[in-house]
Image (cartoon, helix red, strand yellow):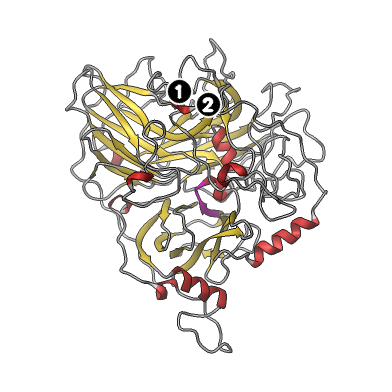
Amino acid sequence: MHTLSQSFLRRFIWLILLVGLFGAYPIAAQDSPILDPLTIPKFVDPLVIPPAMPPMNQAADGFTEYAIAVRQFQQQVLPTGLPQTTVWGYGNANDPSPAPGVVSSFNYPAFTIETRSNAPIRVTWMNQLVDNPGSPDAQYLPHLFAIDQTLHWANPAARMDMESMSPEPYMGPVPIVTHVHGAHVAAESDGYPEAWFMPAASNLPEDLRTQGNLYASAQPAEAGSAVFEYSNSQRATTLWYHDHALGITRLNVYAGMAGFWLLRDDVEDGLNLPGPAPQLGDEPGTRYYEIPLAIQDRTFAEDGSLWYPDERSYFDGYSGPFIPETTVPPIWNPEFFGNTMLVNGRTWPYLEFEPRLYRFRLLNGTNSRFLLLKFNTELAFHQIGTEGGLLPGAPLELDQILLAPAERADVIVDFSQFQPGDEIVLLNLGPDEPFGELPIEPEALANPETTGQVMQFRVVELTDNGNPGEIPASLPPIERLTTELPARTVTLNEEMFMPADVPVEALLGTNTDLGLDWSDEITERIQVGDTEIWNIVNLTGDAHPIHLHLVNFQVIERIPFDVDRFHDAVVGGRGPHGGDNNAPLEPPNPLDFAIGSAHDPLSWEMGWKDTVIAYPGMVTRIIANFDMAGLYVWHCHILEHEDNEMMRPMLVTE
């Protein structure tokens, strides 16, 4: 299972041919030492509840239009009294950048897009990662973190997106492209990883491309921007938007490029849920009883800057040799786990709340960390929804919530039993690894002094503000998908550099080729209108959150299987029982290698999903209807995996 695939060997040979073709931009090492998380005081600053993003106007064709830019600015992420942090965030392009005494919509995380099902939105996304946005003399800003250009990435120095052989970090202008995660959207507005674009800076080097090979815009767009259109043709749900540029998503999102996108509809309105949530025109001091919570982990340097590793040795101590002498990337780390917890862009914040019902929209916005959320007292989550909207049947009463990266949970919590002055802490039990499985052994739990705590809740006096709401007795049913088409088999794989036994890259594949790169021929070709079952076969030792663009899907079951026998069958090109080597070869069916009974979906997986945990040693089976033609992607949402080949194109054809 840890042998180099043919496709990886082809990639490495191609890289050798590129030695010396492309230069690098020098970058300084991160000189400031890491800030000890034990020295960061907890529960000092209040939770920031992101306001609604202001639109530009209502167009004659019915679209609500936004102009949303990405900029660099300073924000108080660490507790008050500690240094501010340089971050990247989205905001209304007409607003000034944040500064003392300046009112601005630029924030990390971004303000929330508030809209309704079937209410179309048009967004002009703008790359303003320059030193003086709006000035004709603006100079581009380099990345906050070291870009490993030996990965297959949005490489502006090459004729197409590809690897460089230079081990030095890239320090040129930064490509971006925004993806609304979970959106049912035309391909040209999906934020394809090769649809990136550069800032409109005055000093862009002439030898760099300003757009990706598959740049797209639904309307004519000025330099440094793209126009995307969203029909919002789906049920009420919790979406989020974030960067998706090829090979640097982990870095752009870690810098702060993320925000909520909330859809509402008449069905949800009729449930009498607690509220309100932030809306345009709210008076200062408005109390909110529906609150989105974007949970992330970060590490800081002592000067307050975000810290992210700039060398490969951080992950497992491997210190070389690297590309081009070996196949090991010099900077990329297989996963990253921060040593502090942030909620809505603040480190360990607190929320003053009343003894009543609250609705929380939980998002795991981390790069790699699986969250297992639990209160430090007897208190239940009443889960009413996941990524695809409301769950069917009665709300689930859970004492803990498991969320892989990119998963969401829509929950109601009843705090009515508490008295003013009481304090509650939201805990995270999930360790520093992509575990995904329950229960967790006590020695593997998160550090209770740091990443084991998320935020604090402080009870205040009850008021009569807002809508008290209720926990619904039942939620609308969901029709289960069926199909008579044969199942599609895809595989999750890991490549190792065996002399040192260290990970080189994560890969997706099929039951005929376990090691497919991003640039290999498209294997997921789907006829528009078809409903398909995907057998997701995990051949690695990690749990992977697998995300499909365009569609919501339903989880069917998980089946344990014999990993080694299936692997050998694929490599040998034969079924589970061997056979005549001269006979036509049929790709092995993973279900023929089952070694146990099927596991039903977990209770919170019975609704519509866009991300599913594929456990080690399991065939995870999902079903989806592909109703819109275009070029999309599917990938692991551990961002470090996604950025190094664990993402593949998906073509839906007419």
Identify the residue under disc 1: 40
Q: CA distance from mark 2 to mark 1?
A: 8 Å
Magenta portion: prevailing SS class: strand
The image position of residue 193, as x and y in percent, is 61, 47
- Residue 230 vertical position relative to residue 546 in the rendered view, above or below: above
The image position of residue 140, as x and y in percent, is 72, 29
Please give the label number shown on residue 35.
2
**In this orientation, does residue 120 appear?**
no
Pick the residue in front: 44 or 213. 44
User: For this view, does 5 lie left or right of residue 66?
Assistant: right
- Residue 183 vertical position relative to residue 69 in the rendered view, above or below: below
Q: Magenta segment: does it hold 483?
A: no
- Residue 555 vertical position relative to residue 427 in the rendered view, above or below: below
Residue at horizontal 63 percent and vertical 31 percent from the top? 144
Pick the residue in front: 17 or 622. 17
The reply to whether callout 2 and callout 1 are in contact (CB within 8 Å) is yes
